[in-house]
Image (cartoon, coloured by chain):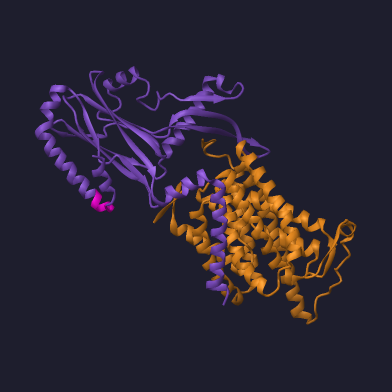
Chain colours: A purple, B orange
């Protein structure tokens, strides 16, 4: 399977899109033949991604992630895509001699770098709220993040909430966090599909795509699939190099600039 | 067309970057300034993290100074001995600057510091240029009216304290006999500024060379560029090593735009009215200055800022 998707990467975008739809159509056709009765018997939800990895190359400016699958029965579907855990520093600006500068700070530890929840029904449905409250990380509101601060700051619940809200607000604005009700499209024959936009500033790491089938507030079936977001090509090389051998990278940057300067002088100034 | 900058970790329109390099390059070609003091704030406005804007600018200035110094070198406009003393101070200063930069970054105040110092710096540069432009304008008018050369009675003996310093050294190319402490001190101060602000420091260094060291005009620019090469090389190396703040892709794009822009600027510079254009540059600098000041003074719409920590 991975081999097929590695082959996908080699195609241009339009080819890739066309192929993906072709393969999706094929899969849907095949699955409508074979899958449903088998699935119904096993009561399992099956989901697949159009690709398992998202390469971030120098030209990366966001991507679309296509999820599709089949669910037994009429239950509601919830898809959660969460990125690797990451720590953040949240700082609040305060006025100092007429100028705004960073003041109190809180560390948010172990929050997912990416968190999106797609659901088949509207967010207000009863099934969802009862299901969500049964587990704590199915909505941004209930997402658990660890917060570390100095002094009295975090002993106040209001302050805690303010810093948490600010963090979530920032992540939402960067399109790293989001919740979209009614975003899973039913195609009939128990098939469904959903589309998730990945922003240009996508953090790298291993993501987990979890799909849940819920009926009357009861979890019937669940499946999880990994998704790999990694730098690729020259962007990956430069980043790795700068990170691992930072002084050698600095030395190379110096040499490169000197060479560029000499070249520029030869080409333009020297004459 | 967007390009993903691997170290800044954002995706920016490639033509905006090339255009920025071109624009600042044209200005630097016309006025003979490095342009770092305009480029770094512009990169910050574009959304490049201030720390990476500063580190990358050091790298870009290294390239543009290298191409600039070669011509001066051929014409004998580099006072190597003076340049070495300035450089020694500059290496010390830029190392100190990167250290201070790292400390400020770790306590989360580097962005604030960069903006505040830039506001002060740009304001003083702009007002200096305005005053100078006004004086030149007046002089040109007096000259055209009376036909006499302006009086040179204002040359005072102001060097008294600098003459009393020890470690007197002879600088042959510049025909000077002054204390070695002076270029060391000037080099250090400019080095700190260069490393922390992503500038070459020419617009601080050159007035200091003229008014404090009293160097002859034909060695000033070449010697300044000569020492900037070493200072920015040191700053690039240390910023990359300690702060991961140098984005080669960004630097190369800026160099590309900057080199072409500088050539155009040099050509146009011969044809345009220097006095009027200097006033224009002063206004541009003032505009950037107020842009930064605005960000500092106006209550921010978002009080919280979020940064990733490793």
Residue farthest to the left? A33
Residue B8 in view, yes or no: no
Residue farthest to the bottom? B147
Residue positioned 55% across, 22% down in the render: A154
Q: Where A221 sits versus B64, above or below? A: above
Q: Where A100 sits versus A156, above or below? A: below
Region of the chain picked out in magenta, as a range: A11-16
Percent x, y for residue A265? 57, 70
B182 magenta-colored: no
Residue B282 in view, yes or no: yes
User: Most prominent secondary structure in the magenta stretch?
Assistant: helix
Q: Nearer the viewer, residue B279 or B105?
A: B105
Picture mark count: 0
Q: Nearer the viewer, residue A56 or B304?
A: A56
Residue positioned 21% across, 27% down in the render: A45
Q: Where B224 sits versus B303, above or below? A: below
Residue B32 position by quadrant: bottom right
Percent x, y for residue A191? 17, 33
Q: Nearer the viewer, residue B286 or A7?
A: A7
Percent x, y for residue B180? 82, 58
* Left or right of B42, for residue A32: left
A13 magenta-colored: yes
* Left or right of B24, for residue B164: right
Percent x, y for residue B289? 62, 53
- Quadrant (top left, top right, bottom left, bottom right) of the N terminus of chain B: bottom left
Residue positioned 30% across, 27% down in the render: A123
């Amino acid at each position: 399977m991975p081999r097929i998707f590695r082959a996908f990467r080699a195609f241009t975008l339009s080819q890739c899109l066309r192929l993906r739809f072709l393969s999706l159509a094929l899969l849907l056709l095949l699955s409508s033949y074979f899958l449903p009765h088998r699935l119904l018997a096993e009561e399992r939800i099956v989901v697949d991604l159009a690709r398992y990895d998202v390469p971030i190359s120098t030209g990366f400016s966001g991507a679309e992630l296509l999820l599709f699958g089949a669910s037994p029965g009429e239950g509601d579907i919830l898809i959660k895509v969460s990125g690797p855990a990451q720590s953040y520093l949240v700082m609040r600006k305060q006025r100092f001699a007429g100028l705004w500068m960073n003041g109190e700070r809180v560390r948010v530890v172990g929050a997912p770098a990416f968190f999106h929840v797609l659901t088949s029904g509207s967010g207000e449905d009863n099934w969802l709220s009862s299901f969500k409250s049964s587990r704590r990380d199915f909505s941004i509101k209930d997402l658990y993040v660890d917060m570390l601060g100095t002094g009295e700051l975090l002993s106040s619940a209001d302050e805690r909430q303010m810093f948490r809200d600010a963090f979530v607000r920032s992540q939402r604005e960067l399109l790293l966090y989001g919740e979209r009700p009614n975003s899973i499209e039913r195609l009939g024959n128990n098939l469904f599909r959903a589309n998730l936009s990945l922003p240009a500033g996508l953090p790298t790491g291993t993501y987990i795509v979890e799909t849940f089938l819920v009926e009357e507030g009861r979890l019937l079936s669940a499946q999880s699939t990994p998704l790999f977001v990694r730098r690729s090509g020259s962007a990956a090389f430069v980043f790795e190099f700068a990170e691992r051998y930072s002084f050698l990278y600095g030395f190379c940057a110096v040499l490169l600039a000197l060479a560029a300067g000499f070249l520029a002088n030869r080409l333009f100034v020297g004459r | 067309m967007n390009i993903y900058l691997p170290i800044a970790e954002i995706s920016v329109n490639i033509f905006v970057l090339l255009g920025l390099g071109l624009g600042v390059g044209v200005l630097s070609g016309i006025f003979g300034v490095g342009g770092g003091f305009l480029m770094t704030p512009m990169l910050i406005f574009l959304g490049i993290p201030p720390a990476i804007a500063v580190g990358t600018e050091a790298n870009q200035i290294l390239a543009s100074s290298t191409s600039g110094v070669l011509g001066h070198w051929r014409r004998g406009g580099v006072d190597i001995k003076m340049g070495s003393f300035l450089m020694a101070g500059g290496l010390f200063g830029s190392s100190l600057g990167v250290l201070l930069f790292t400390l400020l970054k770790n306590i989360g105040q580097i962005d604030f510091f960069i903006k505040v110092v830039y506001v002060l710096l740009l304001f003083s540069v702009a007002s200096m240029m305005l005053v100078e432009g006004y004086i030149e304008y007046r002089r040109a008018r007096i000259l055209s009216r009376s036909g006499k050369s302006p009086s040179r009675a204002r040359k005072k003996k102001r060097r008294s304290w600098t003459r009393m310093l020890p470690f007197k050294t002879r600088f042959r190319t510049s025909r000077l006999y002054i204390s070695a402490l002076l270029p060391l001190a000037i080099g250090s101060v400019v080095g700190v500024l260069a490393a922390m602000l992503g500038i070459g420091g020419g617009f601080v260094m050159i007035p200091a060379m003229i008014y404090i060291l009293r160097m002859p005009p034909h060695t000033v620019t070449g010697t300044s560029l000569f020492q900037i090469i070493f200072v920015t090389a040191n700053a690039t190396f240390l910023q990359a090593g300690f702060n991961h703040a140098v984005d080669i892709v960004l630097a190369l794009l800026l160099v590309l735009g900057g080199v072409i822009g500088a050539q155009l600027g040099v050509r146009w510079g011969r044809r345009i009215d220097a006095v009027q254009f200097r006033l224009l540059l002063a206004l541009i600098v003032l505009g950037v200055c107020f842009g930064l000041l605005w960000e500092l003074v106006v209550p921010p719409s978002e009080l919280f800022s979020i940064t990733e920590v490793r």
